[in-house]
């Protein structure tokens, strides 16, 4: 082989033309010496940044040298050279393979292959591992390009290497593993170009001939790629067996070989045919490795098994063949022994990382095995040790580490839904323990103090670093616990419910047993008694859910079930009445009990009005004394009052007829409370709404009487909005400020030198400031917003469109809507204009404008970003009410309240459909009021506006879309595009200009909110342009007309509406938020088929959107969006022959017309349904821009993933992407303007 390589003239293998080669050949020795110098300069600590940069540039250029392949081969083969120089030689070869392969003749390709084969044959034990791996990687790169086509004897060469030595074997194992991963398991663009050929070749060389003949008798037998009959699966199992027969404890090379063999097996398990796994006894071989006391070998064994049992869609015979070996008593016993061994000395203060990792992997494997049982319990073969497997699952769920137990907890939520599993004796014996574990783990661990002695919390803090991931994880864990409780109650309602209620009673009776009695001054929302009550309430709510599902599922044994149901309802009512006799001084405990009783009353005891009346009386009489000297306690009392009034309204909706029977007594009691001077305005309105709901929802009143009494209540709303004095008072921005007591705000801020005070929260507000603060709050209460909001909520909540109560409300509000809308739109407009410094505060000195800006800057807390706890933040805000910061908070809070209350009213009015949307001149003024000053709002406030705009747009009845939607969509997307683009540009500017010492917290909060706004906007686009998203949206009020045409039909047929949306989409392809980019790209791909005909919109896709997609594709940040971006680019290329081609040819380094045309022809000729092939061709076509592979860019910039975390574990911690503040700038590629020659 070597002789053959030497006969090929060196000049035949170059990166350039023959002429260029001759021109440079005389410089070869000089070049080599310069390469060594450049490498030394990069690694030398004394080198300056400039020297390093020049050296790097030189080395990059050297890879493009015409003789780079032969130089690289010579360097890499020469053991006398330093290791880093030999590695650089390999990268020279790599560059030629990746970027020049298509330009090589078949002979040059064969020569390059010969170089790599020679390097693989000549590796030695003394070579560093990274050099050997690099050679193996080059082998794989060539295999992806030519194996099965020009290169047919690769398998023979691999078998030859396999029998040479352990380190040659390691190269083969690397190649086999990488081929499996890149051809089948990962999306690799190069492999994707020849996916079916490579796939067939892999199946051919891995699978024993006998299995192929039996399973694929009609396959192409002339591939000519195979060496020998046994196949690599058999060889790998034999090698593993050989390793286990050696002294693996003391021989590292043998241990390493065993681990790498199992990794190669693991990579093949997801795609190899199950018959091959059974025929070569892979499972038995791997289980033997699991039995050896070497942790890294055991972990590799578990990962290989996980790859087998993570497979789905198996036929029954395949299922039996794979399950049989692992469910034998011996295998189950082995799994349990290894698991118990990992627990033997598990200590949270001294964790053995390797054993702990093995423990986690065993849990994930247990999850997969459990799901196998859940999928086909009837197919589990005789003789399987199911009792042992259930015992294994039961042991793991009780592990003190939640990270270890969550996969199995998740598995139990599914297993218990299978009647075969649920009814088995062994599972029945575990019910008590499962219930006990799940109840105990519903505590809110994130609220426990950091220094808690709780072992579970200590493990959690050890396992999960970031607060948002911890919160997401615990949310999932609690959800699974609640699921298990729900299923167990549904299975045995009487026994489970009796146990749960007894446990709750015992806890409430002993709430302060080991605690000091409740004191107002020590009140906190996360005290231990509160956390206990919270967990217990969650348990009972899950149990009630299970009980309700049991009732819904009553079948043939209805009579017996009815008796059981009555018994249970008696127990629940008796328990509820017992709880209602208690009085809780802690407002947070009382609040949670009230919420639980409301669920009990309206759900489980929905036909027992006697209990509802008792509960109502409890809420009317539970008046905890307020104490403003303790602000946290005082806030807790107010929260309790609010929850009581909300739950009273909820009861009124459910029991309106029963409450009507005692309406006179209720009205007397309510009026007494309304007239109590200590009752605040909010509570007064809530009490009025309670009476309104009873009248509105009851079915026993005569219609005329009902309407008259409701109209009387609604007249208050109409009178307030049509008051001429009020209309005059909000006619201009200046008078609006005056009506709120802010007419002299600039003068007050100047007189009190707000500009000169650094820390506003430390400066006490003078008495005249406190007077002005109280006046602003009082004036805002006199606006008719709260009254309108409260009665609208009472009129619409929990009502389905078309019901009699809905029709009555719609008719009565139809009279009020035209009266309130003009002034409501004025309020919205002024409340947004308040933030518009340029429009309304520009006549002031610049210093005062800065003060106003600061007054309008919100303080907010954000999980995972803010440096203080949530409670500390609220305590700080609450404690600064009488300071300059408190005054600023009152000003911006009042304006925000007006804005958001107005939004809520508009949202509620959409419930009345044509009465609102049908108003002739509404769309223009509404759009102007909502979006005229929207650009002045922060991203946080714009998100709220986006939410109400989404409801306004989605709620529009189909016949009224042409009238209502154009001004709304145009206004909204004009502002979103402007704001989101500007904010992302500002983030980029801050990142580029910031230094290491900057405080990142505010930047991260800003970026996080911007991500949320961007994604919410993108989600609306998906609904507007893709009918699948539109009809997937929940329809909570029964408003959707199933026969209405999709919204997208109207928008796509109305260019004036579509245009601002597409402009927004184009900008969004460039924002640095992966989730938003992926979503918007998918939506745009669905649109392409609608624009096959020549049109300005098609040209916009082929020009502007294509440019944005290419630019994002080639920026390192977007590495996780590349699949979607490449698919979009492929779709656009199919739209038009000329425009995309001319754009691609204009890109730097893309001037080779014949190469581009060959790729475009291949793309157009490829199967359009084969998305992977389409993507691969695009990625291959564009890979040479600026000479840097897209994937290499990704490898440079992508942060290293936590390698100890599997895909399964990631899903349990899924949380919205956290903003990453990158310091400095990435070299990357130039922006759009540079790439497309635009200025």
Image (tube, rainbow, N blue to C red):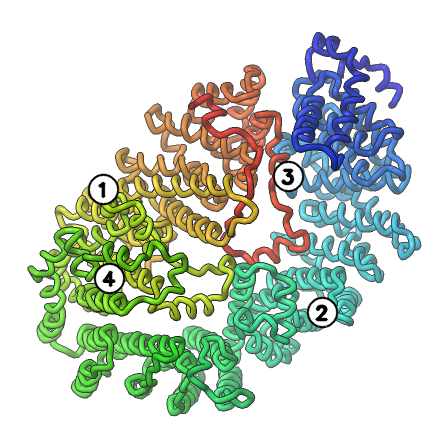
Residue located at (24% from left, 81% from top): 678
Q: Nearer the viewer, mark 3 or mark 1?
A: 3
Q: Please state if 112 lies on the left or on the right of 532 as rendered.
A: right
Q: CA distance from mark 1 to mark 2?
A: 63 Å
The local crowd at label 3, few if under 14, some if 14 to 19, many if 20 or more residues have their Cα within 10 Å, is few
- Residue plotted at (61% across, 72% down): 451
Residue on which disc 2 sits? 349
Q: Position of residue 906 (x, y in %)?
A: 23, 56
**Is residue 373 at all visible to an observer of this figure?**
no
Q: Nearer the viewer, residue 571 or 949?
A: 949
Instruction: Assign a secondary structure to mark 2.
Output: loop
Which numbered circle lies on residue 590? none
Question: Which picture quadrant has residue 1149?
Answer: top right
Q: Residue furthest left?
A: 724
**Element assignment for label 3:** helix
Evaluate if marks 4 and 3 touch, with contact meaning CB atoms under 8 Å apart.
no
Point out which mark residue 801 bears: 4
Q: Are marks 3 and 1 in contact (CB under 8 Å)?
A: no
Q: Is residue 1208 above or below residue 599?
A: above
Residues tagged 2 and 4 counted as in contact (Cβ below 8 A):
no
Residues marked 1 and 4 touching at CB (< 8 Å): no
Q: CA distance from mark 2 to mark 4?
A: 59 Å
Q: Is residue 664 visible?
A: yes
User: Which residue: 51% across, 88% down?
Assistant: 516
Task: Decide if residue 251 is on the left or right side of residue 705.
Answer: right
Does residue 1038 appear left or right of residue 821 in this picture? right
Secondary structure of the residue carrying tag 1 is: helix
Residue 1190, relative to residue 455: is it above or below? above
Query: Circle 3 sits on which residue?
Result: 1195
Give the residue drawn at x 75%, y 47%.
Answer: 276
How many angstroms separate mark 4 from mark 3 (CA)?
Answer: 54 Å
| The quarter of the displayed image where residue 344 is located | bottom right
């Amino acid at each position: 082989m070597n002789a053959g390589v030497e006969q090929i003239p060196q000049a035949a293998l170059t990166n350039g033309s023959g002429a260029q080669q001759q021109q440079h050949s005389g410089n070869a020795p000089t070049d080599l010496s310069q390469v060594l110098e450049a490498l030394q300069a990069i690694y030398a600590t004394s080198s300056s940044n400039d020297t390093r940069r020049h050296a790097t540039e030189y080395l990059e250029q050297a890879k493009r040298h015409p003789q780079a392949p032969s130089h690289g081969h010579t360097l890499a083969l020469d053991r006398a050279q330093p290791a880093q120089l030999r590695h650089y030689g390999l990268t020279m070869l790599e560059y030629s393979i990746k970027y020049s392969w298509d330009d090589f003749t078949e002979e040059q390709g064969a020569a390059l292959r010969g170089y790599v084969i020679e390097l693989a044959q000549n590796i030695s034990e003394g070579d560093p591992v990274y050099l050997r791996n690099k050679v193996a990687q080059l082998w794989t790169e060539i295999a992806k390009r030519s194996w099965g086509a020009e290169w047919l004897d690769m398998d023979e060469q691999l078998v030859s290497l396999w029998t040479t030595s352990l380190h040659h074997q390691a190269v083969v194992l690397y190649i086999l593993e990488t081929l499996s991963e890149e051809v089948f398991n990962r999306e690799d663009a190069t492999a994707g170009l020849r996916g079916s050929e490579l796939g067939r070749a892999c199946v051919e060389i891995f699978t024993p001939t006998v299995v192929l003949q039996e399973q694929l008798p009609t396959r192409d037998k002339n591939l000519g790629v195979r060496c020998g009959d046994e196949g690599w699966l058999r060889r790998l199992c034999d090698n593993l067996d050989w390793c286990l027969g050696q002294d693996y404890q003391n021989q590292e090379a043998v241990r390493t070989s065993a681990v790498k063999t199992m990794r190669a097996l693991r990579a093949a398990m997801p795609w190899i045919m199950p018959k091959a796994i059974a025929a070569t006894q892979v499972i038995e071989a791997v289980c033997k490795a699991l039995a050896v006391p070497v942790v890294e070998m055991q972990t590799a064994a578990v990962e290989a098994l996980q790859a087998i049992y993570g497979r789905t869609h198996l036929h029954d015979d395949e299922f039996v063949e794979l399950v049989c070996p692992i469910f034998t008593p011996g295998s189950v016993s082995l799994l349990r022994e290894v698991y118990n061994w990992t627990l033997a000395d598990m200590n949270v203060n001294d964790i053995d990382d390797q054993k702990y990792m093995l423990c986690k992997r065993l849990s994930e494997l247990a999850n997969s095995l459990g799901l196998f049982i859940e999928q086909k319990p009837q197919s589990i073969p005789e003789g399987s040790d199911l009792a042992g497997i259930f015992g294994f699952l039961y042991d793991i769920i009780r592990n003190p580490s939640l990270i270890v137990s969550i996969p199995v907890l998740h598995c139990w939520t599914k297993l218990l839904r299978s009647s075969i599993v649920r009814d088995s004796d062994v599972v029945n014996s575990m019910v008590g323990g499962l219930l006990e574990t799940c109840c105990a783990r519903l505590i809110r661990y994130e609220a426990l103090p950091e220094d808690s002695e709780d072992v579970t919390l200590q493990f959690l803090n050890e396992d999960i670093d970031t607060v948002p991931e911890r919160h997401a994880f615990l949310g999932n864990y609690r959800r699974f616990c609640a699921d298990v409780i729900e299923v167990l109650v549904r299975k045995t309602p009487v026994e489970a419910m009796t146990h749960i209620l007894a446990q709750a009673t015992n806890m409430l009776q002993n709430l302060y047993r080991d605690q000091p009695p409740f004191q107002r001054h020590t009140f906190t929302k996360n005290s231990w008694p509160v956390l206990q009550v919270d967990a217990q309430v969650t348990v009972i709510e899950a149990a009630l859910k299970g009980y309700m599902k049991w009732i819904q599922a009553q079948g043939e044994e209805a009579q017996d079930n009815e008796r059981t149901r009555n018994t249970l309802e008696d127990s629940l009512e008796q328990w509820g009445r017992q709880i209602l006799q208690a009085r809780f001084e802690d407002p947070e405990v009382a609040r949670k009990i009230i919420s639980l009783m409301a669920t009990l009353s309206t759900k489980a005891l929905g036909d027992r009005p006697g209990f509802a009346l008792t509960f109502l009386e409890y809420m009317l009489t539970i008046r905890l004394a307020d104490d403003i000297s303790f602000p946290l306690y005082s806030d807790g009392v107010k929260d309790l009052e609010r929850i009581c009034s909300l739950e009273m309204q909820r009861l009124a909706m459910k029991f309106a007829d029963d409450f009507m029977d005692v309406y006179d007594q209720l009205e007397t009691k309510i009026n007494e409370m309304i007239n109590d001077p200590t009752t605040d305005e909010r509570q007064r309105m809530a009490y009025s709404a309670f009476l309104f709901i009873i009248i509105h929802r009851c079915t026993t009143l005569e219609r005329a009487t009902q309407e008259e009494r409701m109209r009387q209540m609604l007249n208050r709303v109409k009178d307030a909005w049509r008051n001429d004095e009020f209309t005059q008072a909000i006619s201009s921005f200046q008078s609006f400020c005056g009506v709120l007591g802010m007419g002299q705000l600039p003068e007050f801020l100047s007189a009190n030198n707000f500009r000169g005070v650094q820390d506003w929260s430390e400066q006490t507000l003078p008495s005249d400031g406190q007077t002005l603060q109280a006046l602003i709050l009082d004036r805002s209460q006199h606006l008719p917003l709260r009254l309108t909001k409260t009665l609208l909520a009472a009129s619409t909540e929990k009502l389905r469109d078309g019901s009699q109560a809905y029709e009555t409300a719609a008719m009565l509000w139809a009279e009020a809507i035209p009266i309130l809308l003009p002034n409501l739109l004025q309020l919205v407009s002024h409340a947004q204009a308040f933030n518009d410094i340029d429009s309304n505060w520009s006549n002031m000195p610049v210093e005062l404008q800065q003060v106003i800006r600061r007054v309008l800057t919100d303080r907010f807390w954000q999980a995972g970003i803010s440096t203080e706890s949530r409670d500390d933040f609220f305590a700080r805000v609450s404690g600064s009410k009488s300071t300059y910061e408190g005054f600023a908070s009152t000003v911006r809070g009042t304006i925000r309240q007006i804005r958001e209350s107005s939004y809520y009213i508009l949202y509620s009015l959409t419930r009345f459909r044509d009465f609102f949307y049908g108003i002739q001149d509404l769309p223009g003024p509404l759009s102007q009021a909502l979006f005229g000053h929207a650009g002045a709002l922060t991203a946080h406030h714009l998100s709220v506006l986006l939410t109400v705009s989404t409801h306004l747009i989605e709620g529009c009845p189909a016949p009224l879309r042409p009238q209502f939607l154009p001004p709304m969509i145009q206004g909204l997307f004009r502002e979103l595009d402007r704001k989101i683009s500007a904010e992302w540009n500002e983030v980029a500017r801050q990142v580029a200009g910031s230094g290491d010492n900057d405080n990142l917290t505010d930047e991260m909060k800003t970026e996080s909110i911007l991500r949320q706004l961007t994604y919410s906007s993108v989600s609306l686009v998906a609904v507007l342009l893709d009918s699948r998203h539109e009809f997937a949206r929940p329809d909570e009020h029964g408003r959707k007309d199933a026969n209405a045409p999709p919204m997208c039909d109207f928008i796509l047929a109305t260019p004036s509406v579509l245009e601002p949306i597409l402009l927004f989409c184009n900008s969004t392809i460039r924002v640095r938020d992966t989730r938003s980019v992926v979503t918007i790209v998918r939506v745009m791909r669905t649109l392409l088929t609608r624009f096959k005909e020549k049109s300005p919109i098609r040209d916009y896709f082929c020009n502007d959107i294509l440019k944005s997609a290419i630019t994002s594709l080639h920026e390192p940040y977007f590495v996780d969006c590349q699949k979607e971006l490449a698919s979009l680019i492929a779709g656009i290329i199919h739209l038009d022959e000329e425009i995309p081609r001319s754009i691609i040819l204009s890109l730097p380094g893309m001037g080779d017309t014949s190469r581009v045309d060959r790729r475009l022809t291949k793309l157009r000729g490829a199967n359009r349904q084969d998305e992977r092939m389409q993507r691969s061709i695009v990625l291959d076509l564009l890979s040479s821009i600026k000479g840097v592979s897209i994937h290499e860019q990704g490898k440079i910039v992508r942060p290293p993933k936590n390698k100890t975390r599997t895909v399964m574990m990631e899903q349990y911690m899924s949380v919205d992407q956290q903003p990453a503040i990158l310091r400095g700038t990435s070299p990357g590629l130039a922006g759009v303007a540079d790439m497309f020659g635009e200025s």
